[in-house]
């Protein structure tokens, strides 16, 4: 869904048109809430224009009473292109051509649980923030490793994304990467804890002097891909553990998401690594 293609909705209540949003008041509240400070009047005006356009998308989308809602968040002053450039970081598929093919997890036809939620099972760390660094691939990787290690050992350990950013030279740090390469790195190296090698949201020099080992070398014995375009294969994989996945995040419905089951087009231009932690049904809509 492109913001330029969506007109502002006119909301009608009790037969009367409702007044348009107070964009300036909303913008001022937005700047206060998220601590936004711009470089002069010109940038402020540009950001206000982006904000106003995104608010129009929010109102138009929510007026349709879909299974999800959009809302103002810290990204509402960005265009879709800016959002994608700053906050994604998965290398495009065209760069994966030399990647050795891994074994593939297929659905074997066994009955699937009706719902799975690993966040309630003590194997998922609290939500982390990559900041303005295209290191999503490292967060997707640590999330999957944290879950698999916790299920194997009974101990949940938060792992260092910064180690991958600084030390995994096959990937490109804040300029993007691929989770498969990061898993290969983890198979050959000890992985530090988050606390001993903290995240900086910037490229740095590999420095393991203070590393406290979260997963020892040899602790990661293998990794595999999930069959492409198979919902059942992904569900059966997620039923085993949290799974590293790629999505297309350069859409307004993702940028401005607030709540509910996102039923807008998911897209196929994969640009963002995240973690699948479950599935189920919400208010009659499967997710």
Image: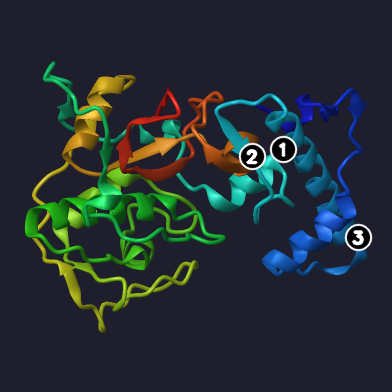
Closer to the N terminus: mark 1 or mark 2? 1
Q: In this orientation, does residue 251 appear?
A: no
What numbered label is drawn on residue 58?
A: 1
Closest to the camera, between mark 2 and mark 3, is 2
Q: Secondary structure at mark 1?
A: helix
User: Considering the image in quadrants, where does the N terminus appear?
Assistant: top right
Local crowd size for mark 1, using a 10 Å CA cut-off: few (<14), some (14–19), many (≥20):
many
Q: Is residue 59 left or right of residue 214?
A: right
The reply to whether the C-beta atoms of the residues labelled 1 and 2 are less than 8 Å apart is: yes
Q: Which residue is mark 2?
A: 70
Q: Is residue 215 above or below residue 98?
A: below
Q: Residue 184 location, x and y as percent?
A: 21, 49
What numbered label is drawn on residue 114?
A: none
Local crowd size for mark 3, using a 10 Å CA cut-off: few (<14), some (14–19), many (≥20):
few
Q: Quadrant of residue 32?
A: bottom right
Q: Is residue 263 above or below residue 29?
A: above
Q: Which residue is mark 3?
A: 42
How far apart marks 2 and 3 lie (CA) works out to 27 Å
- Seen at 88% across and 68% down, the residue is 40
């Amino acid at each position: 869904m492109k913001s330029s293609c969506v007109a502002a909705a006119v909301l009608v209540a009790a037969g009367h048109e409702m007044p348009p949003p107070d964009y300036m008041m909303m913008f001022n509240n937005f700047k206060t809430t998220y601590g936004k400070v711009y470089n002069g009047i010109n940038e402020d005006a540009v950001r206000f224009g982006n904000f106003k356009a995104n608010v129009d998308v929010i109102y138009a989308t929510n007026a349709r009473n879909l299974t999800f809602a959009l809302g103002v968040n810290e990204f509402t002053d960005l265009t879709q292109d800016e959002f994608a450039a700053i906050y994604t970081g998965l290398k495009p598929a065209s760069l994966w051509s030399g990647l050795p093919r891994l074994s593939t997890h297929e659905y074997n036809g066994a009955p699937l649980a009706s719902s799975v939620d690993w966040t309630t099972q003590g194997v998922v760390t609290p939500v982390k923030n990559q900041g303005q660094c295209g290191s999503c691939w490292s967060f997707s990787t640590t999330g999957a490793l944290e879950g698999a290690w916790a299920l194997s050992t009974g101990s949940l350990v938060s792992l260092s994304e910064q180690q991958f950013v600084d030390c995994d030279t096959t990937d490109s740090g804040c300029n993007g990467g691929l989770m498969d390469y990061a898993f290969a790195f983890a198979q050959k190296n000890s992985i530090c804890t988050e606390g001993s090698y903290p995240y900086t949201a910037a490229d740095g020099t590999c420095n393991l002097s203070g590393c406290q080992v979260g997963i020892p070398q040899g602790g990661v014995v293998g990794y595999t891909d999930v069959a492409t375009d198979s919902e059942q294969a992904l569900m059966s994989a997620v039923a085993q553990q949290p799974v590293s996945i790629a999505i297309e995040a350069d859409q307004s419905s993702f940028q401005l998401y607030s709540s509910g089951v996102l039923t807008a087009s998911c897209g196929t231009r994969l640009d963002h690594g995240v973690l699948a932690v479950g599935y189920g049904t919400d208010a009659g809509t499967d997710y």
